[in-house]
Image (cartoon, rainbow, N blue to C red):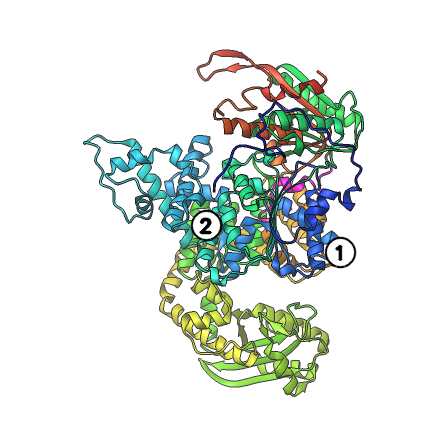
Amino acid sequence: MKPTDTPHTQDGSIPTPGNYPLYEYPAYTFDKKYENDEFQKKVITLDSGYHLVLAPPGCGKTDILAERVVRALSCGVSLDDMLCLTFTNRAARGMRSRILERLQSSGEMSLFVGNVHRFCSHYLFDNNVVARDTTVIDEQESLSIMASIFGWKEGSYAGSGYNRVLTNAIKLQHLGYMIASGCPKEFLMHTDLFRTFDYKTLFKLVSLDYTMENFAGLYTGTVFPKVDTNGQPSKYLDDCLQQFKFARKYQQYKEERNLVDFDDLLILTYIHASQHQDRLKKYSWIQIDEVQDLSPFQFGIIDLFTDHSKENVTLYLGDEQQAIFSFIGAKLATLEWLRERCGENMHRLYFNYRSPKYLLDVFNTYANMELDVDPHFLPKTNNLTEAGQDSLCIMAAPEKDDEVKLVAESVGNFCTSHPDERVAVLVPWNKDADQISRELSNRNIPHFKVSGTDLFTTRQAQLLFAHLQVVYMDSNIMAWSKILTGTGIFNEESEARRFVKYLRDNYLLPSDFLNYTRSSYMLELYRCCQGEYVIFDTETTGLNVFDDDIVQIAAIKVNAGKITDRFNIILHTDKPIPAMLGGIINPLLKEYERAEKVDRKIGLCAFMDFVGDCTLIGQNVEYDCYILDYNLRRDCGDFSFFTVHPLYFDTLRVARIIAPRLKSYKLKSLLEVFGLEGENSHLADDDVIATLSVLDHFLGIFAANMQQHTDCLQNNSAVAELFRRAYADIYHGTLSRLYQRSFETPLLVDELEQLYGTFIQKEWITANPKMQYIFSFLRNDVISPEKIPSLKEQLSAHLLDITTYREADLCDSSCITEKVFVSTVHKAKGLEFENVIIFEATDGVYPFFDKKTPEEIRESARLFYVAMTRAKKRLLITYAESVSGISKWGNPYSIEKEPTPFLRHIKKYFHF
């Protein structure tokens, strides 16, 4: 990268920052928003090369992104060759929604629309880079794990200083791993650690050359320091070496438990993709939004998946004036790199559809004078609505407490005079949001606060989500840890995590305690296989257990490990058989053509007669059992399969228990990994033989370890009994409802609401009125029961998303009936409100007092710009003329404050 810091005007000259007049455009007339103006149309029709589109807020970027997809489709570009990326989940959902709206689609779309982390997550799982049972952990969970590595008690690290120690150790793990893995220097994350810690001095103290190789060796433990402090203890040295040691332990902890954090998603994707470039799926049509918020590393990942041929079109969209996320690795220099890549293919959007002229004049003057934006590039509007008395105001209060009251009073006035409009109070810090929120509550002003502890990360939400996770997939270590802590079996999650790991090492899961008394899934399976049982498999017309047909059923009867009988039939069906199966021609088509077709009722009843009272076993057998149940109901009258066969065993689940770190549990993969006999031909008669090979293999492993398994059960019988009493009925209740269907109400939300009440009643959680926002959001904005009516389908479609939602996702949803929002500026980015109040606009806040470098001050200026440009109609800026309080030494103080210097060029537009 070769960043340049000097903007140029259209004639090539270099402007003097802040000294050029606002450029006056002629009076343009342009089409309605959805008909696209001339500049938008140009961007929509770009179909080759690299292009950078810079657009201020309100210029219709989302519409352009959707329109480009529609046009590309009409020009013959496949959705599978397109890639749409953005910075946040919220922005991705907005983009996807707009695209679906334009395509008039029901929601099924092969086009990937999401953020880079989600793209990487798909890549890692789809390509078997990580274990199939890997759990993605969030920041809270990472801190909890690192605290346990440090030996700290849960909650003891609440202070910012302790949090910083843990965060730095986590950062060091990622940095060290990237260096050790040979990632390019320009892509390294968390290089701020090189400024935070004097590693050069550290390496001198341990007699090592300060090189990347030695840094990596110190992290991996392959380089051994020679400590020489001349006999004097060095706390700094001990602390630094401990950071490396604990960073390494954090990596080991995650690897042993199939855990990855958000940074791991990026790192593992880059490393694997860069090593397998010849096998990568390359995209020839890419558009990336909010590019100013992406890090160089993220662009490095995207480049690996980009088809760089002449037919490629890659569109980068962003706004350099909204680059406010340097603290998570975004760099303004990245835009300069994109400028170099795109060359002459630079585009700008010049029409603002959001703001009236009186607001746009403020934004443009600020952008010109504070952010050094070339006046030629400032947007125009035809909205000539005149400003009212309350449209642009700056108000001062004597002290900060008075400012809080002033803001609350102003919110009330807005609500009274404009009852149908939204009001946002934007604050610099979470503590300010809390203070404003308390004052609004005291005045009985309903509002929604987006700051501090996120609603989706509260104990209430996390326990509910953990329940859904263990019901859907009972091998999730982190979810079980939350359940065991939430139900009071353990006091700390670190203890619960150790316990679940101990169980897994002995081929047990917490679900064994709920399903059995002094027994387990593996013990019951082992006992079953000492007698007679049936292994079966089905081939079907699709994956819908409720409506699809079974076409082939094959089975073998086994007694004490020996095959004693076989069954194999092809059933008549009127439904189409899929032509392709997992990228290959479906072998069932040919088999169906040549075979004699059996009447459905006769064939299904014959299979049930073959099974008799034997226990059923299969690979992913839950699917086979449920589709068999619904086929029997349709074709054989009022027949309940599970009444006759309530017990069945799944070799897929067995594989997850015995070999929890496998990257694929498909039958073909199991045969290959363990070198077993059998063929996974996707025909049922072959698959049952292969399943028997898998079953025998894992039973052999279990038999060799059965004693320690039973010892573990016996030693923890008291814990098992406590857990069973507390949670078994709740767990089994949800399991029993997985295959119920409702086309009118989302059963997943019904389940959550019922569980929420139960958990409160059991005193596992306290009531939190804000939980209703989550329920309403999922019910009205996320889940469509008419398309996916069963709880099982809804969990499959939405559980991953549910665990990644955040409060900011709610702000534009129908679940928020409040008109007033309190948010930090960072969390409000991408949102818009009719009325915006910017709180604490003082020098020392904008810019913050510790921001000293020119770039830090410029980022503070951009932050203030982001705050202002959230406004669609009215903008109120407040500040306190002094701040007073008691110092940590007990002395009272009072400090006079000045308004932010960022007002100097725009205050002429405001009423005081």
x, y (%) of residue 863? 59, 30
Residue that carries the numbered disc 1 in the rendered image: 104
**Vertical relation: 785 (above or below) 20:** below
Residue that carries the numbered disc 2 in the rendered image: 267
x, y (%) of residue 577? 67, 75
Magenta-tinted stretch: 803-817
Name which quarter of the figure residue 58 lies in.
top right
Dot 1: within a 10 Å radius of its alpha carbon, few (fewer than 14), some, or many (20 or more) residues? Answer: few
Query: Is residue 759 inside the magenta stretch?
Result: no
x, y (%) of residue 600? 69, 81
**Vertical relation: 537 (above or below) 799:** below
Dot 2: within a 10 Å radius of its alpha carbon, few (fewer than 14), some, or many (20 or more) residues? Answer: many
Which residue is at the front of the view, 777 or 283? Answer: 283
Which residue is at the front of the view, 850 or 480? Answer: 850
Tell me which secondary structure the magenta stretch mostly adopts: loop
Q: CA distance from mark 1 to mark 2?
A: 37 Å
Callout 1 touching callout 2 (CB < 8 Å): no
**Vertical relation: 218 (above or below) 470:** above
**Vertical relation: 377 (above or below) 278:** above
Q: Secondary structure at mark 2?
A: helix
Upstream in sequence: badge 1 or badge 2: 1
Q: Amino acid at mark 1?
A: Gln
Q: Quick check: 162 left or right of 623?
A: left
Q: Amino acid at mark 2?
A: Ile
